[in-house]
Image (cartoon, rainbow, N blue to C red):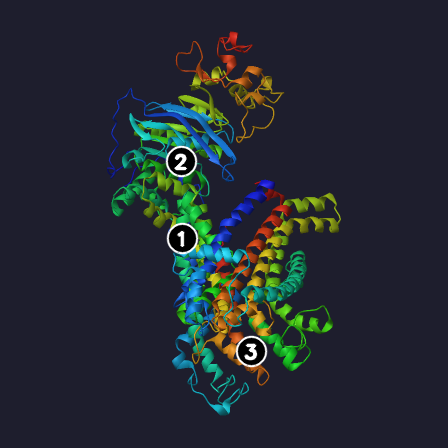
Amino acid sequence: MHGALSPAADALASEVPPAPQRHQSYLRVVFGRFLRQPIPVIAAVILLAIILAAVGADLVAPHDPFQTRVSRRLAAIGTSDRLLGGDELGRDVLTRLIYGGRISLTMAIVPVAIGLFIGGFLGILAGYAGGRVNMAIMRAMDVFYAFPSILLAVAIAGALGPGLVNGILALSLVFIPPIARMAESVTTQVRGYEYVVAARLSGASTVRILREHVLSNVAGPILVFSSSQVSVSIIAASGLSFLGLGVSPPLADWGLMLSALRQSIYVNPWVAALPGAMIFITSMSFNLVSDGVRKSMEVRR
Amino acid sequence: MLFYIARRLLYSIPIAIGVTLIVFSLVHIAPGDPVSAILPNEATAEMVEQARKDYGLDKPFVVQYAIWLGHAAIGDLGTSIGSGRPVFDEVAGAVGNTVILAISAGLVACIMGFVLGMVAGLWRDRLADHLVSLFTISGVSLPHYWLAILLVIIFSVNLSWLPPLGIGPDTSDGWRPDWAHLQHLILPTIATAAIPMAVIARTMRAAVVDVLDQDFVTTLRAKGLLPRRVLWHVVRNALPTTLAVMGLQLGNMLGGSVLVETVFAWPGTGFLLASAIFQRDLPLLQGTMLVLAMFFVILNLAVDLLQSWTDPRIRRA
Amino acid sequence: MSLQLSRPAPLRQIEDRGGPAQPLLIAKGLRKWFRLSGGLFGRAATVVRAVDDFDLEVKKGETVGIVGESGCGKSTAARLISGITPADEGEVVLDGESFFAPRSRISREQRRAVQMVFQDSASSLNPRMTITETIAFGPRAHGVSRAEARDYALDLLAGVGLPPSRFGERYPVALSGGQRQRVNIARAIAMRPRLLVLDEPVSALDKSVEAQVLNLLVRMREELGLSYVFISHDLNVVRYISDRVIVMYLGQIVEQADAGDLFATPRHPYTRALFASKPSLDPRHRVQVAPLVGDPPDPVNPPSGCRFRTRCPIAEPLCAAAKPPLDIIPGSGDGHRAACWAAIPGSGHSLSANAGVLQ
C-alpha cells in the first residue's frame, strides 16, 4: 500500500524503544496523575461536597433560610433544631451557609471565568501579534495593575453601588489583567517555537495557526493559573459582601452573614466565626486542588 | 544604571495618568447624575449650579478630567458629603494611622516571613519545613477580615487581654508610642500581617531552595567555605526575588487595610474608604482612592528600583 | 527507497517560470537589525546588527552552503531568505518574480515554494499533535481535504523512511532525533517546495544518524528537483553537500566560492583560520597555535571598517578605515569572491600586490 522499504530504513525504524501505538489521551494521563496525590484529592472531594450542597440546597438544607425565629436568636451551636446555631434573627445558620454557597460561589467563580475569557483573549492576541498591539494592550493592563486588587474591586463596586451584578463586574476587572499577563507571556513563548514558525511557513491563516497549534499549547497553563485565582476571588468576593457591596439582606451570603453576626460576637462568638470558616475552607480547597492540577501537568521528560 | 532609573520614572507617568483617569471615572460610572453624586441631598439649586461650574460638569469628559486633575494637584479634592469638611483634610488625618499600621504589619510580615522561609528552605523536607508549609498554605487562603474577627473573639471577648476596637483608649485621637496604644495595635497588626507573611515565607523558601540547588553552592561548599559564609551567599542570591514580593505585599496590605480597619474601627484611610462607601460619599471615595493609588504607584516604582539595585543582572539591561 | 509516492500528491507541483538560466532565488542587500531595550524617545536603543548587506544567488538545482561561528547571523539570514522574518531593507526575487520586499506580502503559491527545515530541537514539532497531523497541517491549510491530506502525510512518512503503520500515530516524544528530523523534512516537502532552507539540520544528531539524514537529503534533491540553502557550522558536512559555499562573519559575507575552490584555496583570513582550526588526524599536521585569538566581537558595536580586523593576523590601518567590498578574486572567473583588502590588487594593503599568490 505505501512506498516500499529499504533495509536501511527498516533498521532506522527499529532504533527507538517501542511506544504505544495508541497514545493515551493527554487529559486521561493528567487526571490519573492527579488522583495519585492524596491531599488534592481530599480537597477536591470537600469542594465537590460544598458545590453540590449549594446546587442542591433545596434538598439538603434542613430548614428555610428566611424563616426567622426569635426564640432561636443567636442560639448556641448544637441546639436541637439549630445544628450550627442561630443567627441574629434566629434563622438556621447551617441552612443559610448551604444556601449562601450559591451566591458566594457564583460571585467568586463568574468573575474569574469572565477574566479567563476576556483576559485570555487579550493576552493571546497581544502575545501572538507582538509589536505595537502587544504594547498597547499590556500597557492598558499595567494601569489596572497599579491598584491593589481588593482596593480596585472595592472602589468600583463602591461607585456602582451594592448588588450581585455590580460586584461581579467589579471583580472581573480585577482578574482580567493578571490572566491577560499570564496568557501573553505563555503565548509569546509558544510563538517562538519552531513548529509555529513552520506553520507560518506553510502559509496557513493566522486563525488556523492559533486554533490548531497555539491554543492547545497555551490553554493548559492559562487554565491552571485561572483556577488558582478562584481561591483569591472567594476571599475578595466575600470581602465585598462583608462591606455591604454584594447582595442585600435577607439573602444568604457568607460575607454578609459574617458582617451581620459580627455585631453579636459578645453574645455568641463562635456562630460569628462560622461563615468565615466556610470562606476559608472553600478558598483553601480551591488552592489545594489547583496546586494538584498544576503538579500533575508538569511535563516530565 | 541612571538610564534605567530615568526610563522607569518616565514609564510611571502614563501609568499614573491612567490611574487618575480610572479614579476620576468612578464618579461617572455611579448610577445617576454626577452632580447628585458629589453633593449632599439637601443641596440648594444654587449649590448645584455652583458645582456644575466648578467642575465643568456640562463640558466634555476630557475637560472635566483636566479640571479635576488640576484641583487635585493643588490639594483640592472636593468636599466630603458626610462631614462637610474638605476631603483632603479627612484623608490627611487618616493617612498617618494607616501608615503606622502598615509599617508595623510590614515589619512583622517581612522579618517573620524571611526567617520562616529561610528556615524552611535550609531544613528542606524536615519537620520545620512541613510546619512552615502548613502555615503558608493556610495563610494564603485566609480571609484577613475573618482572622481579624477570630482574633477579637479569642483575645477580646474570651480572654479580655486586648481591646477590640479603636486606635487608643477612649479619648485618644491619634496613636502614641505608649503601652495603651500598643495594645490597640497588636491585633490589627497580626490580622494585616498574616497573609503577606505566608506569601513572603513561601517565596523565600522557594528562592532558598532554588539557590541551594545551584551548582555554585556545591562549589562553595567543596571549596571548604564555612557554613556561615555559604549562608551569606545563599541569602544574597535569594534576596532580590523576595524583596520584590515583599514590596508587592506591602501594596496588598494597603489594599487589604480596607477590611481590617473596618473590623477594628482603626481610623485610617481604609476605614475612611469603607465609610465613604457606606454613606455613598463619592468625593471622599474618589479622594481617598486617589491618594491610595498614588501611594501604590510610588511604592511599585521604589520596589522596582530597589530590586534592580540588589540584582546586578537587571541593572545591565 | 524511492520518494515516488504511491498516490499522486494532492498539491499541485509549482511550475517553473523562468527557465533553467534564471536563478531560482536572488537576494539583494538584505539587512536586519534587532532593537533591544527600547530607547527613551529620542535616545538610541541598543541595536544588534544581525545581518548586513547580504546578497545571495541560488541556481536551480544548486546547493549553497553557509558557514560561520555561532552568532554570525546565519540563522537570521536563513529566515530573511525564506521571508518568515521581514528584513528591514533589501529584496528577494523568486524565479524572476518578486518574493519579498519590506512592505509586501508573499502570495500563497510563493509561500509554498520556499520551506525550512530546522535543527531538531524540543520545539521543532508540536508535542500535542501526532506526526501525521503535523505533516498534514500544511496541505490542509491549502484546501486539501482531511482524508486526502492524511493519506498524503502517510505516503510521505513512508517516503522518508518511517513506516506509517508503526509511526503514523506517534507523538514527537516517542521518536528519536533522527526520526524527528525525518518528520521535519517530510513536513517541509509536503508543500512541494522548490527551495529548501535548512538551518543546522544535522547538528543535533549523532554521527551515524547524521549520515542517514544527509543521504536522504541528497536523494530527495535529485528526485524532487530541489535547490538547497544549507546552513551549518560543521565544515565537513557543508563540504559534502554543497555546490557553492558562503562564509559569514558578524552578519556579513566575507567569502564565497564553489565548494572545491573554497576548501582548496581560501582567500579570506577568517576562512583560513576556520579551516585551520579543524583538528587534523595526521600527526604530521599538528596544530600548535590557535588560529583565531580573542572572542567574537559584539554584534551591537561591530568594529569599524572590516569587522574581522580585531582578530585578523594581517590587519592594517587601512582595514579600520574602510570596509572591503566583496570583490572577485582575479583569475577565478566570477566564482570566487572575498571581502579582504589583502586579496584585492591595488587596494593599498601591504599584501595586496601579491593577491595572486597565497601563503
* Marks 2, 1: nearer the viewer: 1
Instruction: Identify the residue position indicated by label 1 in the image.
Output: A122
Judge the density around disc 3: few (<14), some (14-19), many (≥20) Cα neighbours within 10 Å. many
Residue A239 is left or right of residue B313, and the answer is: left
Amino acid under disc 3:
Ala
The reply to whether label 3 and label 2 mark residues of one chain is: no
Task: Tell me, for residue A273, which label it has, or none.
Answer: 3
Residue B228 on image: x %, y %: 74, 51
Is residue A196 left or right of C304 when viewed as pictured? Answer: left
Query: Mark 1 belongs to which amino acid?
Result: Leu
Q: Which residue is labeled 2 in the image?
A: C85
Above-or-below relation of C285 to B93: above
**Whether residue B294 can be seen here:** yes
| Residue B309: % across, % down | 63, 46
Of residue A180 and residue A45, the one placed in the foreground of this image is A180
Q: CA distance from mark 2 to mark 1?
A: 24 Å
Q: Quadrant of residue C164?
A: top left
Q: Is residue A260 above or below residue B290?
A: below
**Is residue B106 left or right of A51 when viewed as pictured?**
right
Identify the chain of the residue marked 1, using the numbered disc in the image.
Answer: A
Bin the neighbour count of mark 2 within 10 Å (Cα to Cα): few under 14, some 14-19, many 20 and up.
some
Q: Secondary structure at mark 1?
A: helix
Measuring from the top left, give residue B165's x and y in whole percent: 62, 76
Quarter containing the C terminus of chain B: top right
